[in-house]
Amino acid sequence: MTDFGYTMLCEQSRPDHLVRDVQMAEKAGFDFSVISDHYNPWLEEQGHSGYAWSILGAAAQATEQIPLMTYVTCPILRYHPAVVAQKAATMQILSGGRFRLGLGAGENLNEHVVGKGWPAVGTRHEMLAEAVEIISALFDGGNVNFRGDYFDVESAHLYDVPETRVPIGIAVSGSQSCALAGEKADLMVATEPEPELTRMFDEAGGAGKPRVGQIAVSYDTDRDAAVQRAHEQFRWFGLGWKVNPDLPAPSSFAAATRFVTPEQVGAQLPCGDDIDEYVDKIRPFVDAGFTEVALVQIGGDRQGPFIRWAEQELLPALRSLLPGS
């Protein structure tokens, strides 16, 4: 069976509202939850960007059983990988063993704030590979010393190690990241329903491991309002991952998407309240072999209505019509 999850999108809601919303999502029957880890919103219209790890700690205490996961954390500039390992181990303890650490090579949008420059894509992937090695070694316990091309670790040790090792997910977009994920990760993370990604992941050692996808949706009983909201806050998504990682600021995303129309956004994302449209646009993830799909409801003030509708109509339909590939 395909699992369907709920996304706490830090870029569009206040931190306390995100915790409230994931409580509602748990009660509504979502199978898991993920959270974005940003310093900036994609567009100024989104208007928020709280610290994900504080929100995760609060969510762990405010919920009882819904799994939690970063989607995703970048451990190469803004955070040192040794500190990411400490945060993740702490979260696993606070959540009672229901946390997964999603990692990725990041975006200039969030990482430039520490003033270290933005590396080329090949360098970022090399840095991510080193970061994963460090984090995994710390999860193994013991004293860790590391000398790499990008990171050094001096006698690091996690004194609070959870009983259940934190599963590591790696975001993929091409052959290099799929190879790293297949070899080093416990699960694959992606935002595009490309069968080629799951194939490369399998060939690199990922066969049988979970694959987690994500899609933005815009629920509203007024489809025109849903499309307008999606265009206002999420028109950037269509730029793709050859562009998104390199743009430095919300103003850059606004400039890059100034010619994107509401009609184009509405054609790609599920908008409104037609169940068939949602099923048709989510189906490619299931067909591509994704075992989990996280839904992002666009609009911070529309989470309550969406969660209630999802509980009553959307989740039962998805589970019935998209049981798995």
Image: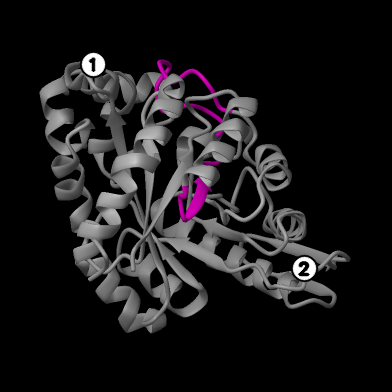
Give the structural element (helix, strand or loop) at label 1. helix
Q: Which residues are magenta?
A: 29-49
For the stretch drawn in magenta, the main secondary structure is loop
Q: Nearer the viewer, residue 34 or 259?
A: 34
Q: Nearer the viewer, residue 92 or 310?
A: 310
Q: Which mark is residue 225?
A: 1
Colour pattern: one colour
Above/below status of 266 relative to 102: above
Q: Which mark is residue 51?
A: none
* Residue 155 x %, y %: 86, 68
**Magenta-drawn stretch contains 13:** no
Question: Identity of the amino acid at label 2?
Answer: Pro
Give the foreground label among 1 and 2.
1
Camera sees residue 181: yes
* Point 35% across, 66% down: residue: 291
* Residue 206 x %, y %: 39, 79
* Point 73% across, 45% down: residue: 61
For label 2, the residue is: 162
* Residue 268 x %, y %: 16, 38
Which residue is situated farthest in the front direction here? 312
Question: Identity of the amino acid at label 1?
Answer: Ala
Measure the alpha-carbon separation of dots 1 and 2. Answer: 45 Å
Picture quadrant where residue 151 is located: bottom right
* Point 52% across, 24% down: residue: 13
